[in-house]
Structure formats: structure tokens, C-alpha cells
Amino acid sequence: MDHTISSSTASTSTTRVVDVLVPVALNQAYSYRVPRDMELAPGDVVCVPLGPREVVAVVWAENAKPDPRLHNRLKDVSDKLDVPPLKAELRQLVDWVSNYTLSARGMVLRMTLRMGENLGPERTRPGVRLVGEPPRRLTPARRRVIDVLSDGLLHGKSEAAREAGVSSGVIDGLVDEGTLTVEAMPPPQAPPPPDPSYAQPDFSRDQRSAVDVMRTLAASGSFHVALLDGVTGSGKTEVYFEAIAENIRRGKQSLILMPEIALTGQFLDRFAQRFGVRPLEWHSELTPRTRARNWAAISEGKAPVVVGARSALFLPYADLGLIIVDEEHDQAYKQDDGAHYHARDMAVVRAHIAKIPIVLASATPSVESEVNARKGRYQRVALPARFGGQHMPHIEAIDMRRAPPPRGRFISPPLAEQIRYAIERREQALLFLNRRGYAPLTLCRACGHRFACTICDAWLVDHRFRQRLVCHHCGFSMPRPNICPHCAAEESLVAVGPGVERLQEEAASIFPEARTMVLSSDLITSIETMRSELNEIAEGRVDVIIGTQLVAKGHNFPRLNLVGVVDADLGLSNGDPRAAERTFQLLNQVVGRAGRDKGRGVGYLQTHQPEHPVIKALIASDREAFYASEIDIRERTGYPPFGRLASLIISAGDRPTAEGFARKLAATAPLDDRIQVLGPAEAPLAVIKGRYRFRLLVKSLRNVDLSQYLRGWLAAGPKTKGNLKLEVDVDPQSF
Ligand code: ADP
Ligand code: ZN
């Protein structure tokens, strides 16, 4: 069928109209007239006027019966861009995600169209080369330029200026004097494609059968979900690389999703060791130029393998043949601003629509995926042991009631002793505490005043490195005062509780000879510094690492054999139905950093409740016990995956408005005996950025189309206006 809306088939009296989806917070596609000389089909990427602006948008459908009365009010499509059209499968994904999550279609499309700036042909860049005699007047600046160019090769002009530490004027001067010539830089060479046969490892017996499944899966070219379920260090990455190798051989593109792209430095190197070149990266820190280049490569099919954060799922792959979701259980896959969606779930949807295989990899699968594997909906591919016969780390609890640390300290004597042994053996130790900053609370000893955010329902966190008190919810910060603002007492302010910065202080005082390093997202200025810090650890230039969950994920530190979890109870007590799952996954993962090389890793969990089922399952390394009890609880309570959930957050600048609207909205919920509407109640964070928040929790049986129910309800229910805001979160991950 020919979808082209060509000028030749239309009569002269009618103007052709197309519906164009624009990447703004709108569900509706807008109608535009097609200029006489333009050929357009659904999927074409166009420029259209939108209010005072021109925006890049996508033809979503032909409009066969435009309303003739509106004709003269429609605007023309301005331009058709010279990029491959969005395939039907991607347009279908955008529609599906919007429909399921109740996010505006335009906002979902926006993730597809993040194509950077210079879409046109690349500008040629000037380069300079040393050709003539040095000038008569040789200033130090000129000498530095000549030094930089002394190899006689062509250098980019701006790079040469930067390297020599001079302005471009200095270079121009040397060109005028005939010392340098200007030539156009050749366009950047596309890297060679990954080579599937570059360096294939020898696999263990367990791995071989998993590899066979991976290859068959990739070769099948049909929708199929595999859960690659292997303990930390079992070689999941090496194994799924074989699925990618097979997919490359078939000439198709592969997408590897990672929860946090900042953490993939080692991954890129490993990929290069296996395939000879690094894969293409996609994440929010790419420069506009690289973004444009990568987007073009992806859409033209010139990027065989793409590694990206969750938004890479929405890119216009020319021929996607395989998706891998690494660390599939990670909550970073849930996006909560703009569009709310879970990238792992939507990846399965994309694979289904595109009829391609998908691999979900984890050492601690999400309860959802675990249940799907148990029910046979996903094919479980198990790697039960570490590669090379290494043992799994031995895990012990330290009962903090029996072995309390000294006052104002957080490292118990038994843990301190183990760290000392590790340092003596020239091994590394990792102290894990999932709390940024120095202390979560600051109070005045004289009057009891506690420092709280003025616009959020939260304490200010002491950040000593930055000398500020910071709100972790809105970013508000103030200098750390010396005097209590409430009672004016001097030197009366005390830090309560530990953060990683405070732990470093403690570690440095107990082990003055040790080299310590704090890894925490707020101390990382760029991906590059992050990668170089991780390298320093991997190369053994740090003895005691103190980190938040940033260190828990994926890294391979060969000399690390001891992991101490400073507060294993931290995530267990917050009332969130997923608290147990989260804590189990996180602690399992962080302890899994230990002993990856020598196989004698040990993990210590400092806890006040060693009898807690999660702690007990961790100590016994009894994964089965954890899943059995967790699945049982979910099933009995009807929580996901045995039921569905959505949360509606209503917020306003004042409490009565928010609460009043939430009550009105709740009262209009259509009755359905398969659906319960709970609340309104104050949201877990009752005030953020001066906005009061109430929540309705919608809970249904599993076989209910909750999105459709919500849409019907919200269409008929009261409308938000003024300061009121309603956010819909289908499948909320924390609440
Ligand atoms: P996981 O992702 O399951 O934690 P990795 O894929 O990171 O495991 O493998 C753990 C370590 O073992 C890595 O250093 C990896 O290079 C090594 N490894 C795994 N399988 C093999 C193999 N077949 N041959 C050589 N090294 C391997
Ligand atoms: Zn705040």
C-alpha cells in the first residue's frame, strides 16, 4: 500500500492535510496543510510552525477528511527534513506508552526527537599545519603554538589554540606571517564496526549452555523474553555479548540499556575487548554535536550497537534486532519527570511491537520478572556460580545492640578490626552507606532547634565538603551557620547521624595510614571525573572506599574483598511495599562487589534487627527464601505483580486547596468492584518546593485495564485549574 500523499493524486481544488504530532505536552496531533510540491507520508520528520516557533515534529497520519471550514485557518508544513522517517513500530510504541502511562503523546515523542543541533551536513572545520620558517618576532605564545604543531601534521585550529593555551588571534598572526597554513580538516572517520569474532572468550560449562540459548534467541528474530539470572561475577555480560555478536552477524542493531550511564566506563572497555571497538553511547551528557552525529548514525543504521540510559529506548533505530536490559531490577529505570515510565517494562513492549528478542539480566531479578520466569512467561537462563570457581562472598551480621560503636561513631569494633586486616593485607575495603553528605540532621544542643527546609517537609542535610546545609528534594541550600538562628547559642550545633562524608572522617581517624575516597553522586562533577575515580579504585590506589549506591552497581574492583554495610536497616523501615525487595537487591549487589578476583569476599551487615527476614536471607545466601516470602506477601496483599497500582498526586500551593481537590476527585471515582481507591492521604513527602501534596492510591486486580479506567475517570472528574496540579503515575515504584 502506498501511503504517499502526492500532489498528483489530489485535485487542484482540495489541499492535502496531515496530522502532525509535535513534541510538546499535548496528546492531540495537529493538522497542517501540505504544500503543493511536498511529498509526505506518516513517519516523515518535518518542521512546522507552532505559535511563534518552528518545531521539529512527525507526520502521524494522513487526514483524509479534513474539515473544509478549518482549511483556511490551517498552517502549512514548512519543511521536510532529510532524515529517515520514523518507522511504524516506533510510532506504535509512542502511542502505546502514552496510552499506558497517561503521559502526553507529544512528551513521549520528545524523547525520540532529541536529535541535537546541527542536523545538516557537518560544517568543515579549519585545521592548521606548520609549513614555513618561524616568524621574526617569536613571543612565548607563538613558540608554544609552534611546539604543538612541530610534528608537521594537520591539527584542528581550535584544538591547537587550546593546547598551546593561546587565543585564535595568535594562530591567525602566524598564518599571516606564512609560518602556518590553513587547510580544511577531513570529516571525522566513522569508527570501524564492532567485530563479532574479535575476541571470543572460552566459556565454562554453565556459561556454554547459557551462550547457546543467547545465540538461538538472537537468531530467532522473533519476540521472546529471556531472564538472564546469574549471581554477581557469573559472567552475565560475557554471555549476553554472544547474543549481540549473533545479532551483529545478522546485520541488525542491538541496544543495551544500563540503569546509569555514568557507571559504564568499565563496560565500554570490556565491550571493546570483546568486539574491537567501543559501542555508540547515548545519554544526557552528550554534546549537541555528538548527539546529532549519534542520532543520525542510529537512524541510518550505521550504529550496530548502542549503549544508553533509559531514553535510548525511544530512538529511531533503522533496524533494531535485540534489546538487552542490564541490571533489570534497578529502580533508576523508572523515569518520574516529564513522562512517567519504566524503561524495562517499555523495552519489553518495544520488543513485542518490533517482534524481536529481549534479554533482562540481573543477579537479583525484580519480583515482577521473577514471577514471570516462574510462570514460564519469560525463559530463565541461569548462571548459578561465579566464573572461575570463585566462591560467593560470605555474609555475616554484626548485631549493633551487642557491639555498638563508640559514641558519635558508626563503625562497630568488629568491622573496624576487619578493615584493619584488609589494609594490612593490602586489600581494599568498601564502606557502604546510602546517604549523601555529612549528616542527615543538624540540631542545636541548647534549644533543640532542627534545621529544616523552608519549602519542603524535610531536614536539611549537612554537606561539609561544600560547607552548606542542603535540601535533597528541592536543592535549596544555605551556608552552615556557627550560631543557632533560633536561640543564638554559639558552638551549639551538632550533626546527628552519619552520611558518607562523616564516615570518611571516621575512617581516616581510625586508619590514619589508609588512603580513603568518597564516591557519592553529589561530589561527581562529570562522567569523566567519575570514570577516572573508578579507575583509581580499580588500579588499587585507594584502600578504603566510602560510597553510596553509586558504588554498588556493576563495577569490578579486583582488590576489593571486604564490604561493610554501615546501616543495613536503612531502607527497611520506610513503609514502602517495595522496601524489602529494594534492600535485598541493593545489599546483595553491594556485597557482590567483594571477592570477585580471589573469591574470598566477605560482607558485614551492621544491623539492629538481625532477625529481619531480608537480613536473614542475605546471611544465609538464601535467595529462594527471600523470593518465596516476598511473592507470598505480594500475592496475599494484591500488590504488583498480582495486582495493579497507580498513584495520583495532587499538589497545590496551599494545603486546603490540594486536600479539597483530592477529596472531590476521589468522590468521582467510578465504582468498580475490581478497583479500590485509597485516600486521599498526605503523600509520603507531604510538602515539596512549597507545594502541598496529597495522594490517591488506585489498586486493582491484575486483569483490569487500569489506564483506561483512569482515563475515563479523569475525563469526567473535576479539572485542575490555577495552581493545582495532578500527576498520574501508573506502576509507581516507590510510594
Ligand atoms: P556479571 O555481569 O555476572 O557480574 P561479568 O560478566 O562481569 O559477571 O564477569 C565477571 C568477571 O569474570 C569479569 O571480569 C569477566 O571478564 C570474567 N569472566 C566471565 N566469564 C569469563 C570467561 N568465559 N572467560 C574469561 N573471563 C570471564
Ligand atoms: Zn527543600
Image: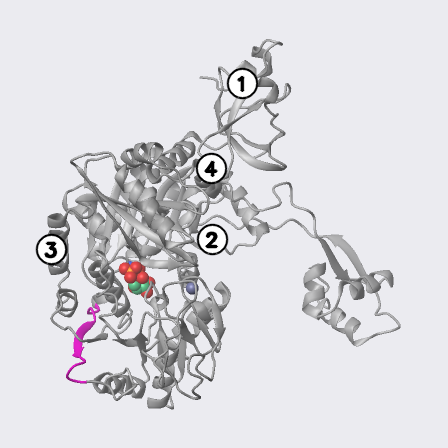
Q: Of residues 197 and 300, which is closer to you in this image?
A: 300
- The answer to if 491 sits in the magenta stretch is no
Q: Of residues 364 and 492, which is closer to you in this image?
A: 492
Q: Which residue is disc 3 drawn over?
A: 628
Upstream in sequence: badge 2 or badge 3: 2
Upstream in sequence: badge 4 or badge 2: 4
Residue at 24% x, 67% y is 587
Q: Of residues 502 and 128, which is closer to you in this image?
A: 502
Query: Image check: 673 left or right of 418?
Result: left
Mark 2 Cα-neighbour bin, 10 Å: few <14, some 14–19, many ≥20: some
Ligand 2, by image quadrant, is bottom left
Q: Amino acid at mark 1?
A: Ile
Q: Secondary structure at mark 1?
A: loop
Q: Secondary structure at mark 3?
A: helix
Dot 4 and dot 3 residues touching (CB under 8 Å): no
Q: Can the viewer see residue 316?
A: no
The number of discs equals 4
Query: In this picture, which residue range is highlighted in magenta?
Result: 390-403
Label at residue 283: 2
Label at residue 5: 1
Residue at 48% x, 41% y is 110
Query: Image check: 9 left or right of 358?
Result: right
Q: CA distance from mark 1 to mark 3?
A: 57 Å
Q: Amino acid at mark 2?
A: His
Upstream in sequence: badge 2 or badge 1: 1
Q: Amino acid at mark 4?
A: Gly
Q: Which residue is disc 4 drawn over?
A: 106
Q: CA distance from mark 4 to mark 3?
A: 41 Å
Note whether ligand 1 is within 8 Å of mark 2. no
Upstream in sequence: badge 1 or badge 3: 1
Q: Is residue 593 above or below residue 481?
A: above
Front tag of 4 and 2: 4
